[in-house]
Amino acid sequence: MDIDINSGLFSRETLAGYDRGRMSSAVVTVVGLGAGGCNVVQTLALAGVREIRLIDFDTVEPSNLTRSPLFDRRRLAGKRTRYKAREAALGALACSYAADPIVRFAIARFEEVGLGALVGSDVVIAAVDSLRIRALVADATRLLGIPMVELGFSGSRGQISVFPNTGGDEPCWRCLHPEVVDGIASCTLYAQGVVESGAIPATQPLAAVQGALAAEHGIQAVHGRFPLGGRAFFLDLHTGQSRVLHLTTDPDCPGVHRRLVGVRPLAVRSEEPVRAVLEAVREFTTEPVMHLPAPYVVEMPCAACGSPIEIGKPVWAVTQPPRCAKCPDLPRLGDSGIVVASTVAGDDPLAQRRCRALGLPPAAIFEVEDRATGAMHVVSLAGGLDDLFETRRRESNAPASLGINKDEEHRQEEPT
Ligand SMILES: [Zn+2]
Ligand SMILES: [Zn+2]
């Protein structure tokens, strides 16, 4: 039986106020493809969101499968490394009812793809476990003026909150969570061996409820509507108790309450040295200093003996407290401090390093300060979505076909 894509298919959604024109050009980015994210994406795909971008570096564990409807059960026995972002993307493509769906996925940390990955999104949905990453998504969406929907769980309780990020004095996610630290502070926590705060993982019923709520508010945001804007909604699946919290702006919020405007695209690629950026901005600056999107860790103390170890990575790439080879299991003695760089000027040896090594991927958006005038200029590196994501489209819209490349399906089954 053929499905006429133009008649009846979205009749219920249209009655509910989803505009077909809007949905068929909608771009929604989901960060974190665990139970919550996977359920969000399934609903977005069924509802006909045209383009879905997915960001997650993590691999699929057996415990994810019972809470992630887009992960293919048949792949349970395979030996191939399974990435959440990839499987969610292929699953979304298979169940999407958009006329010409596009899925893009990045098997990467959120910080690794940078702000450029979010450009063009109508809304960003943060479904990551890590509160630290949620703080980064909150800052990124605020800087770009993109609405953010956030969801989280603990036990039988779920919560979602909506931040229109239209500007002005509206609260951000970090106003709500001033205790969550990022950048160098989180690096210090790593060094001290403190585990990132996480919640009790969700079961499928809770992930489905929260995923549906987040997807609905994501779709509302696509239409420029924010019925839950500036509020957090809490629901206990067991007791049925719910509560809506009106969020207020924290004057001491550690997050960013500003927007990057007037981005000047540079022809410099992320493989070129920082020096090339500093030369390119000479056109409109006299004493340029690059502000890195995340601190660059030059040196960190050994977690055991405290002696300095050379690191040379952006702070987010330091995922474990370093140890020197000579003291693998000794108890921790001291802390010699962490040496980081947050800015790079022309005479700095770091200016010789490639942009990417300093945490600037293709299409990165960042600021350059003119020390002569104090003015900040927003610039972007060369590159686009194809440099950050793998993109898949449907080969055929024939309803009988899943539309997934056959080779891809076979490769899934191959033992490695
Ligand atoms: Zn705030
Ligand atoms: Zn040591």
Image (cartoon, rainbow, N blue to C red):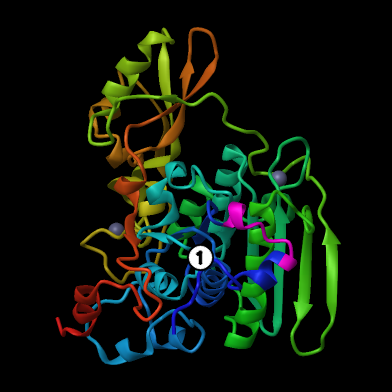
Q: As rendered, which of 195 and 291 lies closer to the eye? A: 291
Q: Quadrant of residue 270?
A: top left
* Residue occupying the point 48% across, 19% down: 369
* Residue occupying the point 21% across, 85% down: 413
Side of 344 relative to 324 (left or right): right
Q: Quadrant of residue 343?
A: top left
Which quarter of the rendering shows the C terminus? bottom left
Residue named by callout 1: 194
Q: Indicate whether residue 281 is drawn in magenta.
A: no
Judged from the image, the secondary structure of the residue bearing numbered disc 1 is loop
Q: Is residue 349 above or below residue 271?
A: above
Q: As rendered, which of 68 and 353 lies closer to the eye? A: 68
Q: Position of residue 329 (x, y in %)?
A: 30, 72
The magenta segment is 15-23
Q: Position of residue 411 (x, y in %)?
A: 19, 78
Q: As rendered, which of 245 and 72 lies closer to the eye? A: 72
Q: Is residue 311 visible?
A: yes
Which quarter of the rendering shows the N terminus? bottom left
Where does ligand 2 appear, by image quarter?
bottom left
Q: Is mark 1 within 8 Å of ligand 2?
A: no
Report the number of numbered marks.
Answer: 1
Crowding at label 1, few (<14), some or many (≥20) Cα neighbours within 10 Å? few
Q: Is residue 135 visible?
A: no
Q: Indicate whether residue 19 is drawn in magenta.
A: yes
Side of 246 relative to 328 (left or right): right
Q: Is residue 333 above or below residue 8?
A: above
- Inspect the image, locate mark 1, and give the three-letter code of the amino acid beneath it: Val
Side of 395 relative to 368 (left or right): left
